[in-house]
Image (spheres, rainbow, N blue to C red):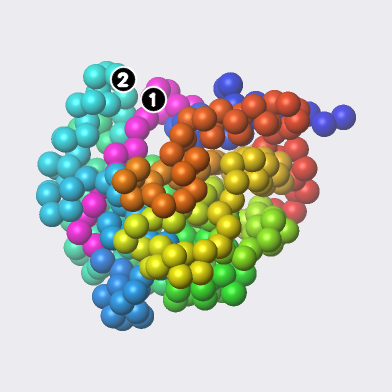
């Protein structure tokens, strides 16, 4: 008989549950913009960037670019502290590629963030091709001292989609970077996007099944947002493609959760987009409705994360 698994009041292993269990209380992520760029923007690989990436390097809710990390941190912290006075913080290097700099500059930035009052760890978003050994050495050093995870954009396992997105890296690049992080025991969270142009639901599920068997500790599920100011917006206007409907997205998320290992931490079930920039799908602006609908779908289907995981990891 199948054994039902619950994480607090959720049927999936949420990041919130994981952090509260680890630290004994509420933990917030504070998104930061440390002034990085990206090899897909500065001309090393391309100047166009990934097709979906916003002008702020997918850090639209991060601190104000150009301000010191301390200042960014202190602008966000009071609102969090007012609600959860005993809360702790993860400093989240979110905007652009946050390992794309010499290791010594990274050292200064990472330790500056760790030095802020109440910070108990770091989350670092980057690309698979921005992890030279000198940076991995630094990450390993930090990992031995505090809570750390690295976020890598996979988006899709399909070469056609990766090329269309202008990622300028391959699945092999992602896999190699993941193994190098795992060799140093650095927790890694992958990002995948549901609703990419012309990907079928079966192709999306192929990405989900592949992720389930990778040595990953975390996963972020994103809905494709078509946003003003991105190359994707120009593609969409020239040749409109169907965006996922709400019910399609909810069912895909639940189907993927069912095949993931129960220990994998779900960092996100859907993404955010600034209201004034979002072109489609507009239903995604009601984020809490989407999250509630996912929880409801799990309940009415009497299912949970890992229900159909095959245990091949």
State the SS at label 1.
loop
Pinpoint residue 272: horizontal percent, then vertical percent: 41, 44
Q: Quadrant of residue 309?
A: top right
Residue drawn at 22 percent across, 45 percent down: 63
User: Disc 1 or 2, which lies upstream in sequence?
Assistant: 1
> As drawn, is 68 to the left or to the right of 287?
left
Residue 26 numbered mark, or none: 1
For residue 122: magenta? Answer: no
Pinpoint residue 123: horizontal percent, then vertical percent: 36, 48
Residue drawn at 70 percent across, 44 percent down: 255
Depicted 190 relative to depicted 82: above or below: below
Q: Are marks 1 and 2 in contact (CB under 8 Å)?
A: yes
Could one spot residue 55 in this view of the protein?
yes
Which is nearer the eye, 193 or 117?
Answer: 193
* Disc 2: which residue: 84
Pinpoint residue 136: horizontal percent, then vertical percent: 37, 64
Q: Quadrant of residue 86?
A: top left
Q: Residues within 10 Å of mark 2 (few under 14, many from 20)?
A: some
Depicted 240 relative to depicted 144: above or below: below
What residue occupies the far right of the structure in this picture? 1
State the SS at label 2.
loop
Magenta stretch, residue numbers: 20-36
Q: CA distance from mark 1 to mark 2?
A: 7 Å
Could one spot residue 123 in this view of the protein?
no
Which is nearer the eye, 138 or 268?
Answer: 268
Label count reads: 2
> As drawn, is 9 to the left or to the right of 55?
right
Q: Quadrant of the N terminus?
A: top right
For residue 31: magenta? Answer: yes
């Amino acid at each position: 008989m199948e054994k039902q698994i619950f994480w607090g009041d959720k049927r999936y292993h949420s990041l919130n549950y994981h952090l509260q269990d680890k630290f004994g209380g509420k933990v917030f992520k504070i998104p930061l913009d440390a002034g990085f760029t990206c090899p897909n923007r500065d001309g090393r690989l391309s100047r166009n960037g990934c097709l979906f990436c916003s002008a702020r390097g997918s850090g639209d809710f991060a601190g104000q670019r150009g301000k010191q990390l301390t200042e960014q941190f202190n602008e966000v912290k009071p609102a969090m502290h007012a609600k959860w006075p005993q809360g702790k913080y993860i400093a989240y290097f979110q905007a652009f590629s946050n390992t794309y700099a010499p290791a010594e500059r990274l050292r200064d930035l990472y330790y500056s963030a760790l030095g802020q009052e109440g910070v108990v760890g770091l989350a670092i978003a980057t690309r698979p091709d921005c992890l030279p050994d000198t940076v991995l050495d630094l990450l390993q050093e930090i990992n031995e001292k505090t809570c750390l995870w690295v976020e890598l954009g996979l988006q899709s396992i399909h070469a056609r989609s990766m090329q269309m997105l202008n990622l300028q890296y391959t699945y092999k690049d992602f896999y190699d970077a993941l193994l190098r992080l795992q060799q140093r025991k650095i927790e890694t969270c992958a990002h995948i996007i549901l609703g990419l142009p012309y990907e079928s639901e079966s192709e999306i599920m192929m990405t989900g099944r592949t992720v389930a068997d990778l040595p990953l500790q975390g996963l972020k599920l994103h809905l494709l947002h078509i946003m003003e100011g991105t190359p994707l917006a120009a593609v969409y206007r020239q040749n409109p493609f169907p965006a996922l409907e709400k019910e399609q997205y909810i069912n895909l998320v639940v189907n993927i959760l069912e095949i993931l290992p129960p220990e994998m931490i779900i960092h996100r079930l859907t993404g955010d987009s600034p209201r004034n920039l979002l072109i489609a799908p507009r239903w995604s602006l009601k984020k809490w409705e989407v999250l509630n609908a996912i929880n409801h779908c799990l309940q009415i289907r009497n299912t949970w994360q890992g229900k159909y995981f095959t245990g091949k990891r």
